[in-house]
Image: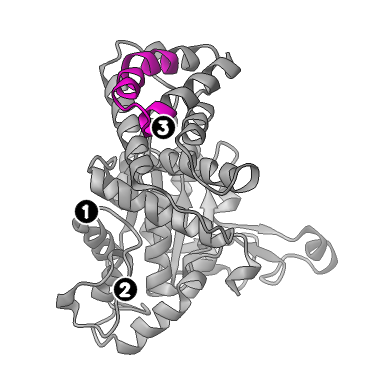
Amino acid sequence: MTDDMLRAPAEVKYAEELDWLESVDDGPKPFSWRLSPRMVRTFVLGSTRSDGLDREIPQKWFGDRSFVERGIVTLASDRGLLLIGDPGTGKSWLAELLSAAICRNSTLVVQGTAGTTEDHIKYSWNVSMVIAKGQSRESMIPSPIMTAMEQGVIGRFEELTRSTSDVQDALISILSEKYVSIPELDHDNIVFAQPGFSIIATANSRDRGVNDLSSALKRRFNFVRIPVVTNRRSEAEIIRFRTTELMRRHRIELEVPPTLLDVLLESFADLRAASASAGSDDERLESALSTAEQIGVLEDAILHSRFFGDSTLRAETLASSLIGSLARRSPEDLAILNKFWHGVVEPRGKQDEGGPWQAFLEGGRQAIATLS
């Protein structure tokens, strides 16, 4: 079934694993949860020997265990969960995994934008049915959030701070009252949330000041701040996990040499350090230099090697992918990358004659010259 989808949701992708966990789960379950809180944690973070399971459950989200546990406990209460952090820290992936484990449905999602309206979180109308038969529950189009309320499952709201204050105010009512009124109808005009309903929202910490959350809305959420991954080992695990998924999806058999992964990790670490010490925004790359962007650079290099190379990942291709992905502003980003290449990569390349850093140096030089 997953082969028929470009990207299967977590509950479909891991259906067999979820079925098995449910079959052996004898822990207490809040509301209508499909798995107990302990087993939800196992699904997200992977199993350990102390779990006593007959099979290994792989880790799917890489981060501090306390963040996951706090999120699960929040969803077992009547409060919403707000995952906040920099771009690329895995907020949306964690929200999807939690929804899949708790209710086997992670697709009831509202995407917050400047164009999101109250209708997107409550309901709208099928105009042709209204003209033909008038307003009724049959002619109403429930939002993903209203559907989650009716089914007693998790609704998701992506990029909450990108939505206007009117939309945020409507969400306050849903989180506090746990029902939605439909004033256009005379009968059957209230949708009550069923036990198990909750909302997982995400917010980008870089959007501070766009549409700040009101104190009233903040009180309806428990905050879990997801930090940028700085642990080298954890970041490598995340990149391997995501890259393996990509190659499986594209049916690509290609080895990622550990030395090249080290080059990528070290380059991003140095770029982050340079960005942190920069005196102004003009001296910083526009990129957030997140783990997700590292994954994007590696994926781009893998696909280029597969379709335009000899199916061997080379340092030159990785360097070209990095420059192409991070040089978003011209000439500002190119100037920053050129300075980085001369000051950081070149000394390493000269010390690593015949090695990956030398090839990485040459590949980056060519990419910068081409874009310049």
Mark 1 sits on what residue? 64
Say which amino acid is labelled 1: Asp
**Residue 93 pos. (x, y %):** 41, 55
Magenta segment, which residues?
336-359
Mark 2 sits on what residue? 57
- CA neighbours of label 1 inside 10 A, class few (<14), some (14 to 19), many (20+): few
- Name the residue nearer the viewer: 155 or 260: 260
Q: In terms of secondary structure, where does tag 3 sit?
A: helix
Question: Residue at the right extreme?
Answer: 132
Of tags 1 and 3, the one toward the viewer is 1
Residue 104 counted in the magenta span: no
Residue 352: quadrant of the picture: top left
**Residue 314 pos. (x, y %):** 48, 39
Q: In terms of secondary structure, where does tag 1 sit?
A: loop
Quadrant assignment for the C terminus:
top right
Residue 217 in the image: above or below residue 332: below
Say which amino acid is labelled 2: Ile
Decide if residue 169 is in sight here.
yes
Could you tell me what secondary structure mostly forms the magenta stretch? helix
Quadrant assignment for the N terminus:
bottom right
